[in-house]
Structure formats: C-alpha cells, structure tokens
Amino acid sequence: MLLGVCMATGCTHTVNSDVATHNVPLAKYMDIDQLELLCKSDTLHNKALIFSHPYCGGCIHRFKEWISPAIKEADTALWRFYYLIVVDSTDTLRYNEFMSDCRRMGIDTNKAYIWRLDWTKEDYNKVFSLFHSTHSLENSAEGIPWTILLDRRNYISNQKMFFEDKRDSIWYGPRDLDTCSVHLEDFSVDDPEWYIMVSHGK
C-alpha cells in the first residue's frame, strides 16, 4: 500500500550479451556522492528524486496515475525533477533504445541518470542519510517505484504512518510525489494533518 514495489523479476529487462550494445555516456551515471552534490548545490529549487525503470509495471502505472499529473501541475520555477533509473547491469544495456523506452513512459531523459546503487532498503537509507528530516525515516520497503522529495534546504518531505488497527504505533516515511505534494514548499515544518493508515500485511 505504501509503495508500488516491484519484484526483481518484474522490474528488470535483460539483453543477451551477444547483442550489440551502446555504452552509457559517463555523464549519465549517478552515484551517491554525485547525487549529494547535485542536490546540495541547488538551494533555489525543490527536488524530486524519482527511482524507476521503464520495464517495471508498477513504475509505468505510478507514472500514469500520479507522477506525470503531478509534474504537469508543478511550478517549474520551484521544482526540479531527476530520474534515477535502476538497472541490473550496464554492460549489456542498449542505451539508446533504453532511453527511447524511458521517453515513452514519460521520463525526461535530459534529467535521467543510470543509478549506480541498487533498490534495497540499505541503499535508500544511504540516500536518506544525505539530507535533513524532521523525523527519523523508517524505511520498511525496497524496490521501485520510489520518490524522495527535497525542499530548497534539502529537507526530506515525510509523512506520518500508523496501522489502522493500532494507531499508537507511529513511524515516518518519505512522502509520495503527487498533485498535492508539489504545492508544498518548506519540508522542515511538520504537517499534522497529513498521515497514512496502513493495513497489516500490506
């Protein structure tokens, strides 16, 4: 319920090694240090970090239903959107074809990068640790799609969560990108009205 998490078998696209490949341009890679520099060097805009893959059914659905409408509604003077594309391997990646598939999904390939980390909980926690948050973020999920929203001071937008049948067990996670969150500006201030109820077993 929290995230449209895709299993590895559904979110990867492999290419036989005997197929001609196109090298990924060096400038299109993104590692954890480069991501930190990209975000912290920009103190004028909110940033949305969108982790996805054009062959992931959950990513395609989320782009269609939530991400693309949110981006269309966002103030481009305030927001910057970056796409971190998770792939299993770049040594067999047909890069040009892959970028075409990204464009068809709705990804702006001018702001798309091949993510050098993976989609595990530990890797996302490394991203969380780069930035500020009003609460410790408890990451209980892994996979894609995933979005992390940052304000101009690089605070992560978070949301309160609790089980619908146990409301005293509160934790915080990153807030989703949608047509509501793109109208927020300062993530260093809590929104007491915003929370998500989670069913057990979801």
Image (tube, rainbow, N blue to C red):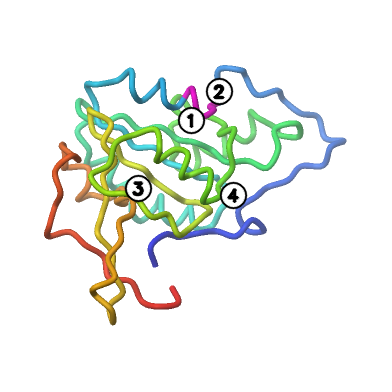
Magenta highlight: main SS: helix
- 150 on left or right of 139: left
SS at mark 3 in the image:
helix
**Disc 4 from disc 1: Cα separation:** 15 Å
User: Who is closer to the viewer here, 171 or 56?
Assistant: 171
Q: Which mark is residue 180?
A: none
Asked whether the residues under the numbered discs 2 and 3 touch, taking CB atoms below 8 Å apart as contact, a structural biologist would say no
- Please name the residue shown 22% across and 42% down the image: 182
Q: Is residue 34 left or right of residue 114?
A: left
The amino acid type found where label 4 is placed reads Tyr
Disc 2 on helix, strand or loop? helix
Mark identifier at residue 67: 3
Give the alpha-carbon distance from disc 3 to disc 1, as whole Å.
15 Å
Q: Is residue 139 above or below residue 130?
A: below
Q: Amino acid at mark 3?
A: Ile
Q: With 64 as the anchor, is 151 left or right in this view?
A: left
Q: Earlier in the sequence, mark 3 or mark 1?
A: 3
Residue 38 horizontal/vertical position (percent): 40, 22
4 or 3: tag closer to the N-terminus: 4
Q: Secondary structure at mark 4?
A: loop
Disc 1 element = strand
Q: CA distance from mark 2 to mark 4?
A: 19 Å
The residue identified by callout 1 is 112
- Relative image position of residue 33 (x, y in whole percent): 49, 24
Quick one: label 2, few (<14), some, or many (20+) residues within 10 Å? some
Magenta span of residues = 30-34
Can you identify the residue that label 4 sits on? 55
Task: Name the mark on residue 28.
Answer: 2
Q: Are marks 2 and 4 in contact (CB under 8 Å)?
A: no
Q: What residue is at 60 percent from the left and 53 percent from the top? A: 11
Q: Is residue 85 above or below residue 11?
A: above
Nearest to viewer (mark 2 / mark 4): 2
